[in-house]
Amino acid sequence: MKRDEEKPFLEHLEDLRWVIIKSLIALVSGSLLCFIETKPVMAILLKPLKASGEDPQKVLRVLGVVDPLSVQLQISLLGGLVLSLPFILYFVAQFIIPGLTPAEVKLLFPIFSCGAILFIGGILFCYFILLPQTLQFFSAYNKWMGIQTDWTLQNYSNFVVQMLVSFGLAFELPLVVILLGILGIINSATLSRYRRHAIVVIVIAAACITPTSDPLTLFLLSVPMYLLYEGSLWVLKTIENRKRVQKDHSPELLP
């Protein structure tokens, strides 16, 4: 449908209803697949614990009768969300593209791609670097306190899931900053001037995002977020310089 052919409001609601239905079908299908293949997914979640030097069979316990089922449902829902996310984004794009200008459509794919790459990058950073170090820190801390490490499976899975999602969302910071800059809400000069304030905000945000308040986890999240902040500042400066050059070389309109 062309942009100048406006749909009635009820047809837009119908399209939105189908987007929600198709997204739910994708989510349920992905969750069902992960529920059937719970063991491989669980092996992925247990890998950081093994990398920290602990044996899951000796460290993890189940206290409640239905705790294993609750953990399986939680893991299935998370895995289903990850598997269905590309399809959900595709359905959402189908819904919003007809109402966008050609210039906005050109920006849509890079924005979605950068967002997905940053989110996955945050998850991978947390999974391979941060989680093993954090688990090793707490295990060593328990030994220093003279306490035997004995965690419940539900507590461990909640911790791992929260950490992965938190870091995935935290790594979206450059995309948010660049989008605000493109929209003209902020500029690189403002970001440079309030760099010290940004450090404080990043530390506070890292403390709110992470499920723990230990200094190690806070440091390992704050440093990448600040580096991403500096990277987004550099990208925003580059965009502004290009716009300035294009404006200087553009021919002036004659009256």
Image (spheres, grey):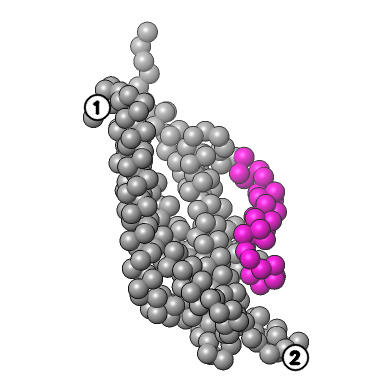
Q: Could you say which quadrant of the image residue 76 lies in? A: bottom left
| Residue 41 % position (x, y) | 41, 75
In the image, taking residue 225 as reference, residue 84 lies left or right, namely: left
Tell me how far mark 2 sits from mark 1, CA to CA. Answer: 70 Å
**Residue 151, horizontal then vertical, whole percent:** 62, 82
Residue at the extreme right of the image, as rendered: 145
Locate the C terminus by quadrant.
top left
Identify the residue at horizontal 55%, vertical 79% (top origin).
Answer: 65
Where disc 2 sits, the SS reads loop
Can see residue 177?
yes
Identify the residue position indicated by label 2 in the image: 146
51 w.r.t. 217: above or below: below
Q: Determine the residue positioned at 32% across, 49% down.
A: 22
Residue range highlighted in magenta: 190-217
Determine whether 75 is above or below 169 in the image: below
> In the orientation shown, which residue stands out farthest toward the left?
1
Q: Check the image and report above or below for 97 versus 120.
A: above
Say if the magenta span includes residue 212: yes
- Report the residue at 56% width, 41% height from top: 188
- Give the numbered dot on residue 2: 1
Question: Of residues 236 and 123, which is closer to you in this image?
Answer: 123
Task: Tell me the quarter of the image containing the N terminus.
Answer: top left
Q: Position of residue 181 (x, y in %)?
A: 51, 39
In the image, 73 versus 141, the foreground residue is: 73
> Does any portion of residue 125 appear in the rendered image?
no
Quadrant in the picture for residue 39: bottom left
Q: Position of residue 28 (x, y in %)?
A: 36, 59
Q: Residues within 10 Å of mark 1 (few under 14, many from 20)?
A: few
